């Protein structure tokens, strides 16, 4: 049995250089307490890109996509951090639930496709890149001014353009700008940003976004599975029988498509279990289909 390597926890003093591009190994850094700053040195001067507070992390792409982190990371105050390197990540995946590994692979694929697309087209459109940026922030509420500054620093987008894109997302109820002076960004449902990102990608690759092409029979099966309380893994034939009991019209064709849509995920014993998070994503997409299509068509 392979040994599980635990993450490394460190207490660092203010000014301590946690990460330096080209010199530090690939790793994921999580802030447990305190504050870190990410910056670039330009002509010998620090240009701060963003701050990292408790719960923030950096380096996901470094581990999943082998992409180098371009920022230097330094402790702004005395801080406690957790570091996960490649060896630790690989050992931890052994005990990771199958559905989570599948989700990580899906996110990795999406990131890779977006990067490939960016190289092909020169740059993503600003609304798409802002949507992706907000999604990766993974927070329900963000300070508006700091968020726009960080986004514009990373993308070189004009502040006026970024604010206009925020207003477009607000008009379609994807986000809300809170306060009399719009001090913060409220994200109604972070998963909706992920869905919108997928739709942008489908438009640019001229491929269909499958949730918007489900048949009425598949939608009926989806609703049935969303209410299915058991989390057990069953044989393929057993699941097909369960679905046919709900509706006799359900055939092997729908069952195969449900596997392709990752509504069912295969476990190590070649049995299948319901991927409820994927069902939640599809249903959320369908609930917001009109708003999403208007954003995509008008962009």
Image: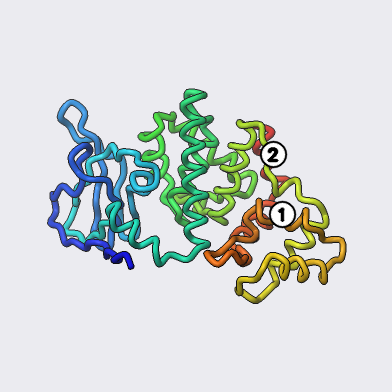
In the displayed structure, 222 sits above or below 113; it is below
**Residue at the spot 33% in from the left edge and 53% down from the top edge:** 57
**Residue at the spot 69% in from the left edge and 65% down from the top edge:** 236
Horizontally, residue 147 falls left or right of residue 174, namely left
The disc at residue 256 is: 1
CA neighbours of label 2 inside 10 A, class few (<14), some (14 to 19), many (20+): few
User: 183 and 287: which one is in front?
Assistant: 287
Query: Percent x, y for residue 35?
Result: 24, 55
Query: Percent x, y for residue 173?
Result: 63, 49
For disc 2, the marked residue is 208
Q: Distance between the residues labelled 2 and 1?
A: 18 Å
**Residue at the spot 26% in from the left edge and 60% down from the top edge:** 82
User: 28 and 248: which one is in front?
Assistant: 248
CA neighbours of label 1 inside 10 A, class few (<14), some (14 to 19), many (20+): some
Evaluate if marks 2 and 1 touch, with contact meaning CB atoms under 8 Å apart: no
**Residue at the spot 64% in from the left edge and 34% down from the top edge:** 203
Horizontally, residue 247 falls left or right of residue 115, namely right
Label 2, secondary structure: give it.
Answer: loop
Query: Percent x, y for residue 291?
Result: 69, 45
Number of the front mark, 2 or 1: 1
User: 218 and 14: which one is in front?
Assistant: 218
Q: Residue furthest right?
A: 249
Dividing the picture into quarters, in which one does residue 54 lie?
bottom left
Q: Which of marks 2 and 1 is nearer the N terminus?
A: 2
In the displayed structure, 76 sits above or below 205; it is below
Horizontally, residue 214 falls left or right of residue 47, namely right
Dividing the picture into quarters, in which one does residue 275 lie?
bottom right
Which quarter of the figure is the N terminus placed in?
bottom left
Which quarter of the figure is the C terminus placed in?
top right
């Amino acid at each position: 049995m392979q040994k599980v390597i635990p993450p490394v926890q460190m207490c660092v003093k203010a000014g301590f250089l946690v990460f330096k591009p080209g010199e530090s190994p690939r790793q994921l850094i999580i802030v447990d307490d305190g504050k870190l700053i990410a910056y670039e040195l330009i002509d010998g001067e620090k240009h701060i890109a963003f701050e990292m507070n408790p719960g923030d992390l950096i380096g996901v792409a470094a581990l999943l996509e082998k992409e180098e982190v371009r920022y230097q990371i330094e402790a702004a105050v005395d801080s406690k951090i957790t570091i996960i390197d490649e060896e630790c990540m690989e050992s931890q995946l052994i005990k990771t639930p199958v559905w989570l590994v599948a989700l990580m692979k899906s996110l990795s694929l999406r990131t890779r496709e977006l990067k490939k697309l960016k190289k092909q087209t020169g740059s993503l459109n600003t609304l798409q890149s802002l949507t992706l940026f907000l999604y990766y922030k993974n927070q329900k509420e963000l300070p508006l001014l700091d968020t726009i500054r960080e986004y514009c620093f990373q993308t070189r987008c004009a502040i006026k353009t970024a604010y206009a894109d925020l207003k477009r997302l607000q008009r379609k109820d994807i986000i809300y700008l809170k306060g009399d002076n719009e001090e913060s960004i409220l994200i109604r449902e972070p998963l909706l940003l992920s869905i919108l990102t997928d739709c942008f990608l489908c438009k640019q690759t001229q491929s269909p976004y499958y949730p918007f092409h489900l048949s009425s029979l598949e939608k009926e099966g989806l609703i049935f599975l969303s209410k299915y309380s058991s989390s057990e893994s069953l044989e393929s034939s057993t699941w097909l029988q369960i679905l046919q009991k709900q509706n006799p019209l359900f055939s092997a064709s729908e069952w195969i498509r449900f596997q392709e849509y990752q509504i069912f995920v295969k476990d190590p014993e070649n049995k299948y279990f319901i991927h409820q998070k994927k069902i939640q994503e599809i249903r959320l997409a369908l609930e917001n289909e009109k708003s999403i299509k208007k954003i995509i068509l008008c962009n």
